[in-house]
Image (tube, rainbow, N blue to C red):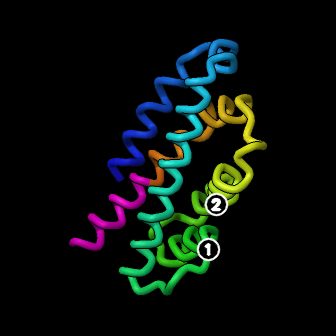
Amino acid sequence: MAIIQSAVKRLNRLAELPRQEFLQNEDAVDIAENRLRRALEALFDLGRHLVVKSGLGIPQDYRSIIEKLEKGKILPADFANKIMGMAGYRNRLIHEYNKVTPEELYEILHTRLGDFVSFCEHVVRYLEDKGR
C-alpha cells in the first residue's frame, strides 16, 4: 500500500502543473507514466494477495482480481465496476506504451487518482473488519 500511496502523492504534485506545462515537459510525462504504472502494479499485486489469502481462488488475469475482490466483499460492487478498466489500462501502459499520450496521462491525473485512495481505504476497512 505504501507504493500506491507514494505514487499517488507524486502524481498529485504533477497534477498541479498547468496543462500545457505538463504536456510539454517530457520528464513530467515520463514520471507520470512510471508512477501510474507502479501504482497499478502495486494495486494488482495487493489485490491478488488478498484474493488468494482470503480463499477466493486464484485470479487468472488482472480483471479477475477485481472481480474476485468484489465477490469476496473486499470491494463494493459499484467501486469494482468503476475501476475494472484499470486492468486494461495497466496492460496499455505495459504492452502498448508507445500509444500512451501525454494528454491521456494528464486526464488521468485529474480524474482517476482518487480511485487509488478509495482502493486503499476499502482494503484497510476490510482488514480492520476481518480483524474484529
Residue 10, position as x, y percentages in the image: 44, 31
What's the residue at 40%, 72% (across, down)?
Answer: 49
Query: Main SS type for the magenta part?
Result: helix
The C terminus, quarter of image: bottom left
Q: Which residues are magenta?
A: 120-132
Q: Secondary structure at mark 1?
A: loop
| Circle number at residue 87 | 2
Q: Which residue is mark 1?
A: 61
Above or below for 70 versus 7: below
Identify the residue at the far left of this view: 132
At a point 39% along the width and 61% down the height, the residue shown is 123
Task: Confirm or deny contact between disc 1 and disc 2 (CB under 8 A).
Answer: yes
Which residue sits at x=54%, y=76%?
68
Residue 109 lies, in percent from the top left, at: 59, 32
Relative to 78, say whether 17 is above or below. above
The amino acid type of the residue labelled 1 equals Asp
Instruction: Give percent across and percent down for residue 13.
Output: 47, 24
- Amino acid at circle 2: Ala
Within the image, what quadrant is residue 22 found in? top right
